Image (cartoon, rainbow, N blue to C red):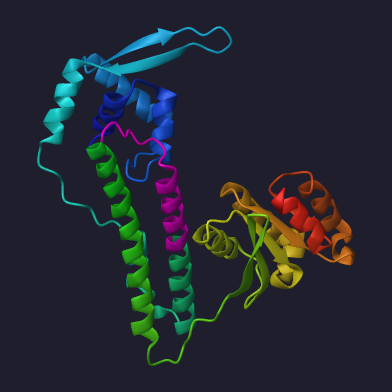
Amino acid sequence: MSIQMAILGILSWKSSTGYELKKIFEDSSFMYWSGNNNQIYKALLNLENEDLVTSEVVHQDNSPSKKIYTITEEGLKELKNWLVSSPEAPEIKKTFLVQLAWSDMLSNQELSDVLSKYENEIKLQLAMQKEKYRRALHSPNRSTRESLIWEMISENIISTYNNELNWVRETRKKLFENEGMEEKDKMNYQIREIENKKYIELISAAEPLGTENDALDLIALCWEHGINALMIHYTALSEDFFKLKTKSAGNIIQKFINYGIKAAAIIPRETIQKGRFKEMAMETNKGNHFRLYESIEEAEKWLLK
């Protein structure tokens, strides 16, 4: 299927600018094109040349002019012809399967770590899809049947991630059932609720946090519980977090920012005041995504405001 058919589908719902089409592609879980400007505008140009869409430049007083695209009667006919054509079989294209195929050269621990990382990525995607489904962004909902169709599409995507999660767990179980390897309880945490506001308090971790994957574990945990506020105790952080040359802190903080998690770390005064880390602490505490505090009370107050 070409991006042109996806664009015609969107325009059959509502007239849109190229930028609006880009946002819909970016937010969609099943319209898989990157939505870069070149791809979209090239497709729109082809559609316009074939008289499947028309465009109108709308001038605005306090903003740049915008070009709005609308589907034509010919465009609607073309879209319907495609809708009744034979569907394509689903493609199975999973990079991880290629990676796993040659993993026998790894030790048990290395292979277990690879499976854990993949499992965490699935959890993160699953939580993200559930959140998209909850928000129902860019869903037409023009009729009861259309709402049900889009709901079933979301269920298809969510079930795919659930099946993948079950598969990777079953794979680990079969690979290591005779090895006596058990999954450690990675994180010791609790959910705090104050005046109907919640945050996750991470008290400790089996392996102190120091990598981007560790941050993804926490983000998946937050999304699993529908919470976007996180408190991290000093004991849950690795030594690398406090060594700026490792870039551990910067990488972890950036993940929290990218995924909309508000996080606060409880750090002893003597650590916050050390050398270059003090400079980083002063800088991060100016922002709205990640801050360092000496007390739980201060961190909680900021997290919940």
Q: Is residue 125 shown in magenta?
A: yes
Residue 81 percent across, percent down from the top left = 11, 29
Q: Is 135 positioned to the left or the right of 278 in the image?
A: left
Task: Name the side, left or right, on which 236 lies relative to 148.
Answer: right
Quarter location, residue 24 = top left
Residue 149 position (above or below residue 140) = below
Q: Position of residue 212 (x, y in %)?
A: 59, 60
In this orientation, does residue 68 appear? yes
Q: Quick one: 48 or 268, which is closer to the camera?
A: 268
Note whether 269 is above or below 115 in the view shown.
above
Q: Is residue 65 above or below residue 303?
A: above
Instruction: Give the residues drawn in magenta, as a range.
Output: 122-143
- Quarter location, residue 162: bottom left
User: Left or right: where does residue 88 sit relative to residue 303?
Assistant: left
102 or 132, which lies in front?
Answer: 132
SS majority, magenta: helix
Q: Quadrant of the N terminus?
A: top left
The residue positioned 45% from the left and 92% from the top of the image is 180
Q: Residue furthest front?
A: 195
Which residue is rendered at x = 18% and y = 16% of the image?
A: 73
Q: For this rendering, which residue is in front, 14 or 196?
A: 196
Horizontal and vertical percent for residue 229?
64, 55
Can residue 35 be seen by looking at this rendering? Answer: no
Q: For residue 121: magenta?
A: no
